[in-house]
Amino acid sequence: MEGSMAHRLALVRQRLVFLLVLFFAGFAVLALRTLSLASACDEGGRALADASSRLLAAAPEDASRAERAAIVDRAGRLLAVNLPVRSLYADPHRLRDDPARVAHRLSAVLTDVSEGLIRARLESGRRFVWIKRHLTPDEVWRVNALGIPGLAFKREEHRTYPQGRLAAHLVGFVDSDGRGLMGVERAFDERLRKPSPGSSGALRLSVDLRVQQALRDELRRAMAHFSALGAAGVVMDVNTGELLALVSLPDFDPDHAADAPTAARFNRVSQGVYELGSTFKTFTLAAALDAGVVRLDSRYDARKPIPVAGGYTIHDDHPKRRVLSVPEAYIYSSNIAFAKIALDLGLDRQRAFFERLGFFRPPVIELPERGRPLHPERWREVNAMTAAFGHGIAVTPLQLAAATAAMVNG
C-alpha cells in the first residue's frame, strides 16, 4: 500500500515538473516573440502593430535618404536645413481590415489627406503606397494609436526654411523628395545633395539677412504707399558684384510653396523684364563721354519736342524749354537732349556699349530664374533715341543694378 502511494506521488511530481517546464518554455517563446516584434518596428518608440523591417527595405530610394546640406547667409545664419521626420506608407496586401474602413480611420487623423485619396491608394493593388509624407509628431502618435496592421513609417529628411518668406526667391524650395525646384536649391542641387567630404557641408551665400530684412521692409512700405502690384530690389557690393540682398514682392512661404500662386513665385529681380525708363540715361551719357562725342560743357537744344515715325514725338515730362548743358540735361532728365546725345553717339556705338553691359542676354547670376531682355532686332535711329531714355528696351532690375555698379566702381 505504502509502495503504491509513493509511486503515485512520484508520478504527480514528474507531471508537475513537466508542466512547469512547459509553462516556462511557453513564456520564454512569447517573450522572445515580443522582443522580436518590438525590434522590427519603427525606431520611434511608438511602433505600429505589425513588424515592418522588410517593408522598410522595400521602400523606394530617393534623394531625401541622404541629408541635404544646409544653406546659410554670409554670417552663418540658417536659411534652409533638413530635419528628421516620419512618412507613412502601407502594404495594402497586409491589411487585415477593409480598405474603406482603414481610409476612414486614417482620414480622421490625417485631416489634410482626403478619405477618397487614401482609399484609392489602398485599393490600387500595389505592394507599396504612400499615405502621407512628413507627418508631424502628433500625427505619428495618433496613427500609432490606431494600431492598424499593414502600415509603417519611413524615416526621411524634411527641408524647412527658418526665415520663412524673407529670402524665398533667393533660396527657393524643394519637392517632397528633396529635389531643388527653384532658386539656390535648384541651382546648387547637386552640391547640396552631395556635400564635400570633411566639410561642414553648409552652402554659404553672399546675402546678409540683416540687409535682406531692411530691404524687404522698405519695399513693402513702398508697395503700400503707391498701391503697387509688385516690387523688386537688390543691394550689391559694386566692387565685387556680390549680392547682399535680393527681394521680390509679392513673395511666398517656401515651407508651403505648392500653395503659393504662380505670380508670387515669379522672381521680379532676375526674371522680370521691364522698360526701366530714365535710369538708362546714365548709360547713354557714359557711352557718349567714353566715346568722346560729348563733353560736360556740351549743350543741347531742348526747346521743342522731336517728331518721330507714327505721329509720335519725344518730349520732356518737365520741360525747361531752353538750351541745356550736359549736366543740366542729366539733372532735369531731358528726353529731348538725350535723344540728341544718342544720335551724336551713333547707332553702332550705342548698341555695342549696351551689349557690353549685358543688356542683350539673360542676367549673369547663380539662379535658374533668369529673364531674357527684349530689344529691337534692327537697331534703327528711332530705337537709338528712345533707348537713350529707357524706352523700347526691357531688362531685369538685376541687370540695371549690375550695369550701374560698372559705372561707379572705378
Image: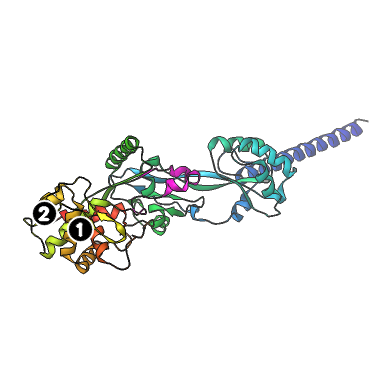
Q: Does residue 100 lie above or below 368 as drawn?
A: above
Left/right of residue 176 with respect to residue 315 in the rendered view: right
SS of the residue at dot 2? helix
Left/right of residue 370 with respect to residue 23 in the rendered view: left
Q: Residue at x 43, y 42 (%)?
A: 253
- Foreground label between 2 and 1: 1
* Pointer 1 residue: 339
Q: How many marks?
A: 2
Q: State yes or no: residue 263 in magenta.
A: yes
SS of the residue at dot 1? helix
User: Amino acid under label 2?
Assistant: Val
Q: Position of residue 5 (x, y in %)?
A: 89, 31
Q: Residue at x 32, y 64 (%)?
A: 376
Which residue occupies the foreground of this view, 288 or 162?
Answer: 288
Q: Position of residue 256 (x, y in %)?
A: 48, 43
Q: Position of residue 125 (x, y in %)?
A: 71, 54
The residue carrying pointer 2 sits among few (fewer than 14), some (14 to 19) or many (20 or more) residues within 10 Å by Cα, namely many
The range drawn in magenta is: 248-272
- Does the image show residue 102? yes
Q: Quadrant of the N terminus?
A: top right
Q: Label 2, label 1: how many angstroms apart (C-alpha)?
A: 12 Å
Which residue occupies the foreground of this view, 185 or 191?
Answer: 185
Q: State yes or no: residue 277 in magenta.
A: no
Q: Which mark is residue 326?
A: 2
